Amino acid sequence: MIEETNEEFREEYRAMNRRKVLFILAFILLAAGAFFLTLGFGVYRIGISDAVGTFFDHLAGNPVDPSDDYYVWDVRVPRALGALLIGAGLSVAGAIMQNDFKNPLAEPYTMGISSGAFLGATLNIILGISIVPFISGTATTVVNSFICSLIPTAIIVLVAKYRRLTPTAMILTGIAVMFLFSSITQIMMVTAPSETMADAYEWRVGSLSSMQWEYIPVMLVVTLLITVILWFSSSKLNVMYAGDRAAQTFGENAENIRVSTLVLVSIMTAVLICFTGTIGFIGLVGPHVARIFVGSNNRYLIPASAAFGAAFVILADTVAKVSGPNGLPVGVICSMIGGPLFIWILVRQRKSAWM
Amino acid sequence: MEKKTTTIIAAVVVVAIVVVAAVLIGFGGNGGNDSSGDSDIASQLQIRGNANDDYTIDEKDMEILDDVISGDKSIDDYPLADVNNDGNVDETDKQLLQDLIDRKDGTTVYVLCLDVNGKPTTVSCTYPLRNVVPYGTNMQLPTLYANGGQYVAGYFVSSYETAESSISDSAVDLGGTQRQISDAAWKNFTTLDANTEGGLGALLVDYSGIAQITDVRAADLEAADIPMIIYSSADATSEITTVLTLGFLFGGDCEEIGVEYAQKSWDVINLIEEKVGSLSNDEKCSYICCTMYIYICENDSTFNSSASTAGGLPYYIVNSDFSETYAGDGSTKMQSVEALSNYTDVGAILNNRSMDWGLDEAGIEELVIDTWDHDNKGVSSTMYFKGFEDRLVYINNLLPGAVKVAYMAHAMYGDDFSREWADGVLQDFIDMGTAPLEGQTLDTVLAYIDYDLYREVTA
């Protein structure tokens, strides 16, 4: 009788896991479909089937129409890949932050990464300053924002090294750094001419319109590598979810795990947003939506967050491309569509996804 | 039968009423019967008293006034004969005109310009005009081209060290920006007026910056009795009349340079009109104007007016999709590198960029590369103009209007207007002795960048 009950429980457990895997596969398929769909959207007029055909023609080394090939292969494919990577990366980063800090409001930007990145970008956009002297031209904004985005994390890690910080204290330190950086940025913004101020604000909102092939390898390698490392650390992360003391009973040092994953997540976030600006929403909400469907086990939560984030951002960018005379920043669309969608999911769900 | 006849009569009456009304409206529209006296007057020198609508005020204008007073000529045909803008031409106008002919100090001059809504108006100021404050590059440069830098009491921004070097050393930097007059800058302006003996002579405003003159600021000007002279001087032909009119108002050598500037400018424009003015729309070269690297000028932009003066056909006339997308009189930033992708049949892309001069060879090379490969937040300009390289040119927006028009004509009709000819027009303006170009040569001014030049400097 007990064996039968155990077997039923095991079968139910396996079925539940299969459903989780199915959710992940469904969103991977959705993201893949959205990838081909988005190739047919934009200002340049080309149908979806022709765009997909152009994509495969290029892969086969046989591009037919130079103009089609340029706008599909050189412009839209890197933009679509960028959308997939930033959606996946930020969503995974959010999942880890929420897990590490046991805080549903934590997200990739909680530690002040976005304010640091924005400060770096603003230094170049408004003042024309390059932090690295030998860097100039189109790379300056990217390098500036990458370097500055890591400063808040570095401050928190340094403080945590010399003085033991609770998760709440770390978040508060991040918020303090964020305000400090924001105030410096605001000084530049209030004295800036209207055009450059508009450029800086546009960067702040986040856009994929500047995505280029050169950026993809860096984004891909960093996102893939860090996501895989985090996935292989799922069991340790799951222990963190139970709390610092519980982690200790399992022989894990919660503080070390928190700091090391914080560094990894910060690097991934910095690499992604330095190319696109601080695209919001997905890092906060992506993990919540994934958690509703797959629960809090990081073995499923990390790939589910990645799959949902990728599908969501690429679809949002498809909408962004056809909004207005020649498109809108994806950051605006993410929040505009994602906000109501998230509320709808929260209202519809029967049980609390968090805790 | 009777009913049918009545219907026909009624129809004829209705048609007759409509025709008569249309004719009356037509006469009303063309008759210049505007009691305000500020109807749209096409004049070269925008001063009341310039009755014969030429480039100066002299005895010929007085002869017209005499004829108008005697009834031999009508004020409707010579609206500028109303020198004091009171709706009548009488002995008072004659006395005022005589003072203007004598260039008498302290004379009240009635200047035709725009009001804050862009409608024609007349404002008065004192001759000769002194202690002016220009606002906006498109007004500051015409002031300097009229050699009026010596009479500038203050400026809101000066971004071009060499081109604007003739601004008086004693002029006060009021601390604004190209696009904005902050409250602090306006306070500096009113303080300057209070500290200037006799007050400021006028605020000179380019219409594209009119949003900065709020109702409160306009009231400040009225209270302080500071005239505001507004022109849409970003347009090449308006810029010519602006230089001519400001030259007259400053008086002396400035008037001479203003006249020479206007005459040379009209010679260039007339030559272009002569060669390509009669072309049909099908034969004309279509163009899209851009500014600030990746902003597309909207249909009614003043940049388009200049390009049309150069004989081009604005692309919105050719392409209805473009016309709908870019309706307006400002400019729209390209949100993606695909923005121009559906307009591949355009003849020329005329990109306006303000570039200071006084350059050496290395400076020119650097500026060419910075312009062509400009970093737009991580995306090079070349990405936006991919496929348009052979039709894309950058034209220096600081140059005199006629010089810009000459280079635009060369870009669109290279067979009719050679590069040497356009360079010759620039050389003529350099030789003229207008202050901003003083000491420059064709080698120190980067007037025109095309793909050939870019490839040459990057080879």
Image (spheres, grey):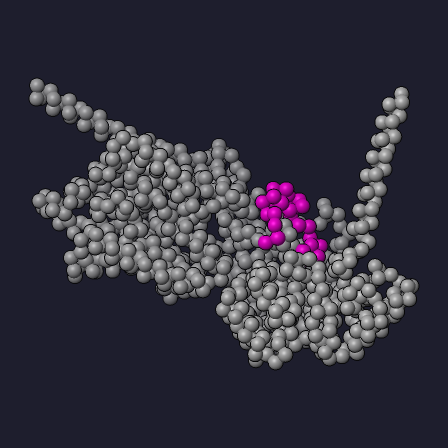
In this picture, is B438 found above or below B115? Answer: below
Q: Where, by quadrant of the figure, is residue B306 drawn?
A: bottom right
In this picture, is A17 found above or below B310? Answer: above
For this view, does A100 lie left or right of residue B56?
left
Residue B45 in sight here: no
Q: Quadrant of the C terminus of chain A?
A: top left
Q: Nearer the viewer, residue A231 or B60?
A: B60
Q: How many discs mark residues in the rendered view?
A: 0
As for residue B329 lying within the magenta part, the answer is: yes
Q: Nearer the viewer, residue A346 or B371?
A: A346
Q: Where, by quadrant of the figure, is residue B205 drawn?
A: bottom right
Q: Quadrant of the N terminus of chain A?
A: top left
As for residue A79 lying within the magenta part, the answer is: no
Where residue A217 appears, as percent x and y from the top left, is 35, 48
**Residue pictured at 69% horizontal, 54% vertical:** B308
**Residue pictured at 44% horizontal, 52% vertical:** A202
Where residue A301 appears, as percent x and y from the top left, is 25, 38
For this view, does B208 lie left or right of residue A87?
right
**Residue pictured at 22% horizontal, 25% vertical:** A15
Where residue B166 appears, as percent x and y from the top left, is 60, 76
Residue A337 in sight here: yes
**Residue pictured at 80% horizontal, 52% vertical:** B30
For this view, does A143 lie left or right of residue A45?
left
Q: Nearer the viewer, residue A107 or A121?
A: A107
Residue span colored magenta? B305-330
Where residue B33 appears, as percent x and y from the top left, is 80, 55
In this picture, is A84 found above or below B121? Answer: above
Q: Where, by quadrant of the figure, is residue B89 drawn?
A: bottom right
- The single residue placed furthest to the front in the displayed view is B223
